[in-house]
Image (cartoon, grey):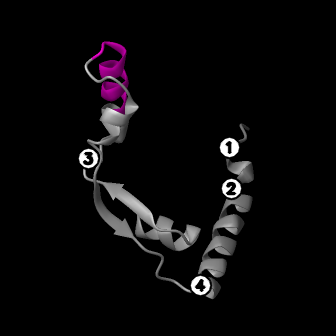
């Protein structure tokens, strides 16, 4: 999460429940069968565990993104079959 915050230059919120895919499916099913009336009731159950704030300066961020882009470029041929 810290790396995401650093590279995107925005705060990243980590929820208390990190199993968001399963929880999202459960919430949608609960809404569908009437367990919850609407999404506003579901939102009340969501809580932040921690907020990761960007901690690197722009020069470091730019260098890291440039390195990532270079690595992706070099990997283009790896997926081709012989």
- What are the residue bounds of the magenta stretch? 24-34
Of 26 and 43, the residue lying toward us: 43
- The answer to whether residue 27 is above or below residue 11 is above
| Residue picked out by circle 4 | 60
| Residue picked out by circle 2 | 75
Say whether disc 1 or disc 3 marks the residue closer to the N-terminus: 3
Q: Please tell me whether the stretch drawn in magenta is mainly helix, strand or loop.
A: helix
Q: Quadrant of the N terminus?
A: bottom left
2 and 4 marks in contact (CB < 8 Å): no
- Image x and y of residue 53, in percent: 43, 74
* Spatial separation of the CA atoms under disc 1 and disc 4: 30 Å
Decide: few, some or many residues near mark 3? Use Cα within 10 Å; few <14, some 14-19, many ≥20.
few
* Spatial separation of the CA atoms under disc 2 and disc 3: 35 Å
| Residue drawn at 68 percent across, 56 percent down | 75
> Image quarter for residue 30?
top left
1 and 4 marks in contact (CB < 8 Å): no
* Spatial separation of the CA atoms under disc 1 and disc 3: 35 Å
């Amino acid at each position: 999460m810290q790396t995401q915050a650093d590279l995107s230059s925005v705060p990243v919120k980590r929820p208390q429940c990190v199993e968001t895919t399963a929880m999202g499916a459960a919430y949608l099913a609960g809404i569908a069968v009437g367990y919850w009336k609407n999404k506003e009731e579901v939102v009340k159950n969501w809580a932040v565990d921690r907020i990761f704030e960007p901690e690197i300066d722009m020069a470091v961020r730019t260098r890291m993104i440039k390195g990532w882009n270079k690595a992706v470029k070099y990997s283009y041929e790896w997926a081709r079959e012989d």
